[in-house]
Image (spheres, rainbow, N blue to C red):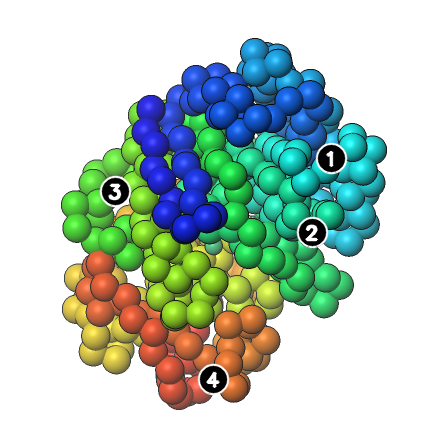
Amino acid sequence: MYKILVNLGKDSHPIFIGSRVLSQKLPSFLKSVGAEGNILVVSQNRILRKHKPYISAVLKKAKMKPVFHILPDGEVAKSQRELFRLYDAMLKSKLDRASFVIAFGGGTVGDVTGFAASTYKRGVGYIQIPTTLLAQVDSSIGGKTGINLKSGKNLAGTFYQPKAIFSDISLLKTLSKQTISDSLGEVVKYGMIQGGALYPWLEKNISKAAKGNIKILEKIVLESSKIKVFVIESDVDETQGFRDILNYGHTFGHAFEAALGYEKITHGRAVSVGMVAACEMAYRLGFIKRNVLDRQLRLIQSAGLPTSLKGMRLKPKAVAKYFLVDKKVRKGEVKFILPQSIGELAAVKGISPSLIEEILKTVL
Ligand SMILES: NC(=O)c1ccc[n+]([C@@H]2O[C@H](COP(=O)([O-])OP(=O)(O)OC[C@H]3O[C@@H](n4cnc5c(N)ncnc54)[C@H](O)[C@@H]3O)[C@@H](O)[C@H]2O)c1
Ligand SMILES: [Zn+2]
């Protein structure tokens, strides 16, 4: 079992990581914060089908009575309708400002539950129990909450930190190999951010993670969490620019997702190809040697992820227009996060449209 403290002044909170960490740590944590009686657990049927007995037993041990609120599967869980249905459930279970809500799920459950918790009665406490690899390495950490609006993803949101995060690795056993691979896109990103010993370790082990090896996944969650915590501690509300490096591969990735329509490609696959494009751009600008690009290509392939979108019939011009609608664009200028080496990323602006198109041609 590992514990990381996220140091954010009055919003500081622990992350517990390990197999069965829920049963080891949740009851004593709930006791320490004085939680009692009903506790609202927000989740989805797919998750509860596998893990309801486990979480129910843990909450029983903590002398809490879980009230389950079920969200639908997919992005629709982050809709205005589901948000208001969740507020109603919070009212019904008589949550007040001393109560807690548990987000028991992947990034979708975490985002909408966090948003509801931050706004209901001007804020009630919430606990993240991430059940997907993506949520354990990425979305549960950092306090970004949100829902989708008709015109785009995550357009309404808050920064609101959970009281604690429990990354129980045993929950990952029921994920499909495809879902695990998809999340490894973010892990490759962390490897590029960190460099050091992590990158060669990933080169040796990421294929085992893709096959669901629990020990390897535990180390991946631990190392990724440390990096994300370090970044957000330095730039909690995205005002210092440091948090930008988490966007490596995402400027291209978001444009691919938008151009293809979100159903045709997963986020992790889009980000993987986005990292290939970013590396290619860095290479053409003379920032890195070919070797960096080649190593990253092999790492992405070992994770079971794609390195191009050939065959998906996307035109460079059609993709390029999506750069400007990205949330991160300021004053019409697109900012790319590009490697200077493995372990060193930097934001670069002022890239010419012709170079962007050239790069797109190499991955489309
Ligand atoms: N807040 C942030 O900082 C942040 C960061 C990255 C992504 N996100 C958001 O995260 C969302 C994607 O999250 P995700 O990839 O976790 O997908 P998800 O939450 O949609 O979960 C994927 C599927 O797996 C199922 N599932 C979850 N845990 C399971 C388990 N243990 N066993 C079996 N099935 C399980 C879910 O029911 C769902 O059907 C997006 O909405 C994205 O915008 C947020
Ligand atoms: Zn991402």
Badge 4 density bin: few <14, some 14–19, many ≥20, Cα 10 Å: few
Viewer-side residue, 59 vs 124: 124
Q: Position of residue 199 (x, y in %)?
A: 22, 48
Q: CA distance from mark 2 to mark 3?
A: 42 Å
Residue type for callout 4: Glu
Residue occupied by mark 3: 202
Secondary structure at badge 4 equals loop
Residue occupied by mark 2: 122
In the image, taking residue 261 as reference, residue 81 lies left or right, namely: right
Residue occupied by mark 1: 95
Secondary structure at badge 1 equals loop
- Nearer to us: label 3 or label 1: 1
Residue type for callout 1: Leu
Tell me if residue 79 can be seen: yes
Residue appearing at x 69%, y 30% in the figure:
40
Q: CA distance from mark 1 to mark 2?
A: 12 Å
Secondary structure at badge 2 equals helix
